[in-house]
Image: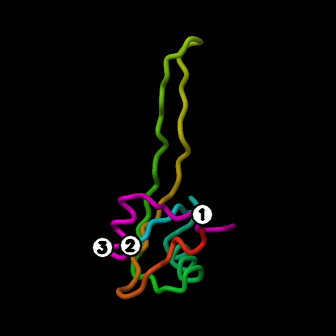
Amino acid sequence: MSILIKPIITEKATGDSELNNRFSFVVDSKANKIEIKNAVEAAYGVSVEKVRTINVRPDRKTRYTKSGMITGKTKAFKKALVQVTEGETIDLYSNL
């Protein structure tokens, strides 16, 4: 079971990593903060100061089509905001 699924690379997350040394990851929905901290420290070789988690709810959409009304939703996921100690950084673009 992999705890870290993928990093979140958006404009907001990139700005947060540059200014506040805080990185965002999509994590397993059953993982707790201690498991996330240990996984980030093992994967990237940095020391983690703080971990904050968010359960992101699914977005629901409704469309009106020729065949009638169609509803759908996106998947729910868990997001982790990881604060790394001052002076350390995570290079998310090295694996591309």
Residue 45 is inside the magenta segment: no
Q: Is residue 73 above or below residue 8?
A: above
Which callout, 2 or 1, points at the residue further toward the start of the chain?
A: 1
Disc 3 or disc 1, which is closer to the eye?
3
Q: Quadrant of residue 54?
A: bottom left
Say what amino acid the circle numbered 3 marks. Leu
Is 93 or 70 nearer to us in this picture?
93
Say what amino acid the circle numbered 1 marks. Ile
Give the magenta range: 1-22
User: Residue 20's x, y, as percent?
Assistant: 31, 74
Is 26 or 14 nearer to us in this picture?
14
Which callout, 3 or 1, points at the residue further toward the start of the chain?
A: 1
Marks 3 and 1 sit apart, C-alpha to C-alpha, by 24 Å
Q: Is residue 5 above or below residue 57?
A: below
Mark 2, secondary structure of its residue: strand
Say what amino acid the circle numbered 2 marks. Arg
Residue 4 is inside the magenta segment: yes
Q: Which mark is residue 77?
A: none
**Coloring applied to the structure:** rainbow
- All told, the count of numbered labels is 3
Residue identified by numbered label 2: 22
Residue at position x 52%, y 65% from top? 7
Residue identified by numbered label 1: 5
User: Residue 66's x, y, as percent?
Assistant: 56, 11
Residue occupying the far left of the picture: 19
Quadrant that contains the C terminus: bottom right
Circle 3: is it few (<14), some (14-19), or many (20+) Cα within 10 Å?
A: few
Residue identified by numbered label 3: 19
Q: Are marks 3 and 1 in contact (CB under 8 Å)?
A: no
